[in-house]
Amino acid sequence: MALDSDISAVSLPVAGIAIAVISSFINGSTFVLQKKGILRSRDRGGSYLVDAVWWSGTVAMIVGQIGNFLAYNVAPAVIVTPLGALGVLFGAVLASWILEEHLNILGKLGCVLCCCGSVMLIIHAPKAEAVTSRLELEERLWDPVFVIYALLVVLMLIVLIVWMAPTHGTSNIMVYVAICSLLGSFTVPSSKGLGLAAQDIFSDGPPSSGALALFLGLLGTLAVSVLTQFYFINKALESFSSNMFEAVYYVTFTSTVILASALLFKEWTALTLTDSLAMLCGLTTVCVGVVLLRISQEASLTWKQKGLREKTE
């Protein structure tokens, strides 16, 4: 029996890593396929909601999110999250083939720097303390520091969605990226919490009212978060390159998940000076990568506009 439990303990992270890798490749194709569907429908003058390619990207997103949910409940988030960088790189390759979004040397360098900086942030982020019971999770969720953080995130989302998105969304990619990334503060904790709550609900005995309320609350939060992200991701793809959006989105999503996890599990109390400096270097690397991606996009737009003027002349 002891041998079986040891084998199970070793196989679970391996299964989580395998699921995370597959999900990363699936997620890497979602933005490209949805962008392709949006362009096809725009050429036809119809809605992308009836385009088969767009729906294939949507189905891939659903499958990828289910894979992420399983991976986060089988392996530690500190292992699963950096594997998302594989999806960014795969998406860049796929976009150059399907969408002909060829990144110049600055864009390629920016994409690599974003991935490397994000992985550095995750590696040196303080490790989470294991939460093994629903009662412990409820205690963490009602911690005053996390409650204040959650309220601030909700307030920022209201400002971004109500005021910023209608006026600046199509001209500044960071508006849509910020909305989707801040929603990630609720997505990952909800995914982890659902696994703990489900253990109490689907156990042999009758489920407690507290477990059922927590399960429904987390499920509702996850559903609203995912659907809202889905809407604004497509809004971003209507106006911006899938390459740039995916890279910047991965960076900001990873950063907000690390921050939310640090506050929820009080990881910041275990942060050392060495890890703090390493995270600062990772954040600097990410910022340089984002700047290079922005410069690359502006240069591409300038060349396209120049080519159009030459054709009209």
Image (cartoon, rainbow, N blue to C red):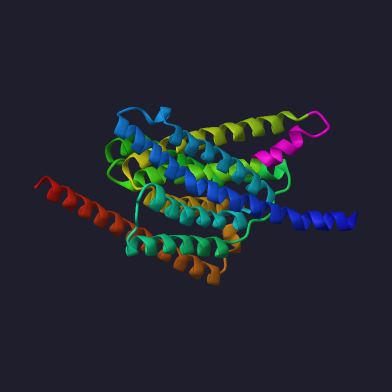
Examine the residues drawn in magenta and state their main secondary structure: helix
Find residue 1 and report its horizontal and vertical position in percent.
91, 54
Q: Residue at x 66, y 30 (%)?
A: 213
From this viewpoint, is residue 118 visible?
yes
Find residue 39 and report its horizontal and vertical position in percent.
34, 38
Q: Nearer the viewer, residue 6 or 146?
A: 6
Find residue 211 and report its horizontal and vertical position in percent.
71, 33
Q: Nearer the viewer, residue 35 or 81?
A: 35
Residue 197 among magenta residues: yes
Q: Residue at x 18, y 51 (%)?
A: 307
In the displayed structure, does residue 219 sit left or right of residue 175?
A: right
Find residue 311 and report its horizontal and vertical position in percent.
14, 48
In the image, residue 242 sits, relative to residue 56, either above or below, namely below
Q: Which residues are magenta?
A: 194-206
Q: Nearer the viewer, residue 297 or 288?
A: 297
In the displayed structure, does residue 138 sit left or right of residue 104?
A: right
